[in-house]
Amino acid sequence: MKLRYKTVPSNVALIITGPKLGDPEKERNIFQDDEGRYMKVIRGGGHRLRMFQTSTPVSLTAFQLQKPAQLYIH
């Protein structure tokens, strides 16, 4: 199995999914969803298994939502 080191900018988190992410009891960045699947959140960079794990970048940049005009009902 080949390890590949992936890096991301400071405003991006890398979500890694797949087998052999590590021990969720020892690492705080491994989470389990409602269906029992595990994911690992990495900021900056980290290793992933090339053929078995997938990585998805997620932007951490804040954005503004346009607030619609208030409706007044009389």
Image (cartoon, helix red, strand yellow):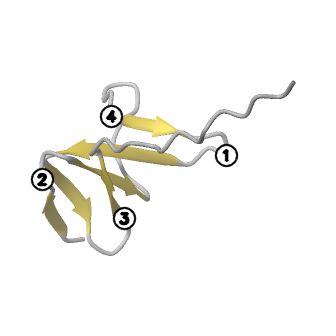
Q: Nearer the viewer, mark 2 or mark 1?
A: 2
The amino acid sitting under disc 3 is Gln
Q: Residue 27: x and y, percent?
A: 30, 30
Checking the image for residue 23, the label placed there is: none
Inter-mark Cα distance, 2 to 4: 18 Å
Q: Secondary structure at mark 2?
A: loop
Residue on which the image places disc 2: 9
How many dots with numbers? 4
Query: Sequence order check: which comes first, mark 2 or mark 4?
Result: 2
**Residue at the spot of label 4:** 29
Q: Which residue is mark 3?
A: 53
Q: What's the distance in space between the residues labelled 2 and 1, CA to CA? A: 30 Å
Residue beneath the point at 72% across and 34% down: 71
Asked if labels 4 and 2 touch by Cβ distance under 8 angstroms, the answer is: no
Q: Residue at x 38, y 37 (%)?
A: 30
**Quarter of the rendering containing residue 36:** top right
Q: Is residue 22 above or below residue 50?
A: above
Disc 3 residue crowd, few under 14, some 14–19, many 20+, Cα 10 Å: some
In the rendered image, the quadrant that contains the N terminus is bottom left
Q: How many residues crowd around disc 4 within 10 Å: few (fewer than 14), some, or many (20 or more)?
A: some
Q: Which of these two is toward me, 40 or 1? A: 40
Splitting the image into 4 quarters, where does residue 47 fall?
bottom left
